[in-house]
Amino acid sequence: MKLVKPKKFLGQHFLKDLKVAQDIADTVDTFPSLPVLEVGPGMGVLTQFLVRKERPVKVVEVDYESVAYLREEYLSLEDHIIEDDFLKMNLHRLFDGEPFVLTGNYPYNISSQIFFKMLDNKDLIPCCTGMIQKEVAERIAAGPGSKTYGILSVLIQAWYNVEYLFTVDPSVFNPPPKVKSAVIRMTRNDTTELGCDEKLFKLVVKTTFNQRRKMLRNSIKPILGTDSPLTEDALFNKRPEQLSVQQFIDLTNAVEKALATAPQPLPAENE
């Protein structure tokens, strides 16, 4: 069967280095007993190493040409090749509601959306590994005080421990992307409850980082309004990138308390 031509509108960059593919496949071994879901397998360069592991493997691919190629080249997968959009799938139906490891050479144009879906299904996904744009990987792994620390950093690190594993050069892809790539692993931490309203936590993080150069007393105004006495606290002299996950949790609780004493409609969350 002829090779699949990478499609720009799908953000496809097919990995061609087998050593890198093997190294990515091995990142799932942190949870050796769990099944694996691979997102965006393309022509299966990563899939070929995943299926050698003694565990159930399913792949989800939205590109019909890639699906046809996989069905012809990976007969062992049988009914485990899913032609669908990962972002629209009900993940509870995949492995009869059992947890699984998520992995893939993720399309760079939707990697953040993939990780937001991971967060929405965090009780199903104890581990997520894979390759993404280096800049995004650095952002996810960054700590407070870093210029790359932001929304993804806080929301993911609230629930997952993040490991930046290794950097990948553009030359190992077809076509080569214009940026470097990186492989990361995110493993669920011990947090079962944040200790604050999760929806408000998400709103506080996104609202403040949307004006990351401003002090909190200014960036929080869309939620608290202009004259909230809460902003007189010294914490509001900081910028959002200076706050740890725990400080954002504490901030969320303070905001919720302030809103309870001076109710006002919350702004719509901007995903």
Image (cartoon, helix red, strand yellow):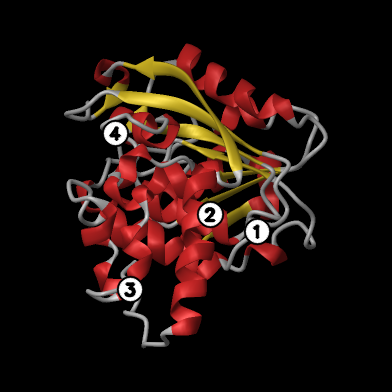
Q: Which residue is mark 3?
A: 224
Query: x and y percent of residue 196 in the render?
Result: 60, 63
> Is 50 situated above or below 253?
above
Distance between the Cα atoms at labels 2 and 4? 20 Å
Q: Nearer the viewer, residue 98 or 13?
A: 98
Q: Which residue is mark 1?
A: 195
Mark 4 vs mark 1: in front: 1
Q: Is any atom of residue 88 visible in this view?
A: no
> Is 46 situated above or below 264?
above
In what element is the residue under mark 4?
loop
Query: x and y percent of residue 265 in the render?
Result: 36, 87
Badge 1, how many Cα within 10 Å: few under 14, some, many 20+?
few
* Image quadrant in which the N terminus is located: top left
Q: Earlier in the sequence, mark 2 or mark 4?
A: 4
Q: Which residue is mark 4?
A: 148
Query: x and y percent of residue 187 in the render?
Result: 64, 36
Residue sitting at x 27%, y 41%: 6
Residue 44 placement, left or right of 208: right
> Is 41 situated above or below 94?
above
Q: Which residue is mark 2?
A: 249
Badge 2, how many Cα within 10 Å: few under 14, some, many 20+?
many
Distance between the Cα atoms at labels 3 and 4? 26 Å
Residue type beneath disc 4: Thr
Residue type beneath disc 3: Leu
Residue sitting at x 64%, y 54%: 122
